[in-house]
Image: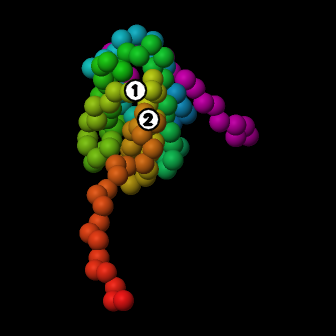
Amino acid sequence: MNTKKYFQTVNWNSGTLTITTPTTVAVDILQNISGQSLFLPEVQNAVASENALFDYELIVNDPNGYISTGNILIQSAASDVGVTVNGVPIYTASTATSKLFLRYLGNNKWVSSDGSQQGGPQGNQGAIGPTGAQ
């Protein structure tokens, strides 16, 4: 029995792109697809091997900067129910780095990042407490 897994890169030339299997690990944007939709692999299929699992990552490469000035719509597989990308059913994404990293966190949650921001925003300074007795 051959247990070797095969991974592939898909070229995105036009229109909507649907990633049908979790063996796809990268998408290369070759034409201006601004405003088009990317459907992510299923996470709720009854056949477990057809699902993207926790920590699956899909990398979208945009070497020509088509989505640095435009955007794409990222959404879960049409058959999945209640799945979100960055907390919303349809996430509008662009990139300042020529890459998008889409990671499945489990529990019907995907996150998207272009890798440009490390960590969240800085919080406000807390109140200064009373001075101790001398």
Quadrant (top left, top right, bottom left, bottom right) of the N terminus: top right
Q: Position of 26 compared to 37: left or right?
A: right
On residue 116, which mark appears? 2
User: Is label 1 in a helix, a strand or a loop?
Assistant: loop
Q: Earlier in the sequence, mark 1 or mark 2?
A: 1
Examine the rendered structure and indicate whether residue 132 appears above or below residue 104.
below
Q: Are discs 1 and 2 less than 8 Å apart at CB?
A: yes
Q: Position of 65 compared to 83: left or right?
A: right
- Span highlighted in magenta in the image: 1-20
The reply to whether residue 45 is visible in this rendering is no
- Look at label 2 and name its amino acid: Ser
Location of residue 88 by image quarter? top left
Q: Residue furthest bottom?
A: 133
Give the camera-side residue of 114 and 37. 114
On residue 33, which mark appears? none
Quadrant (top left, top right, bottom left, bottom right) of the C terminus: bottom left
List x then y, in percent, for residue 17. Answer: 38, 22
On residue 96, which mark appears? 1
List x then y, in percent, for residue 89. Answer: 26, 41
Give the camera-side residue of 53 and 72. 72
Examine the rendered structure and indicate whether residue 82 appears above or below residue 4.
below
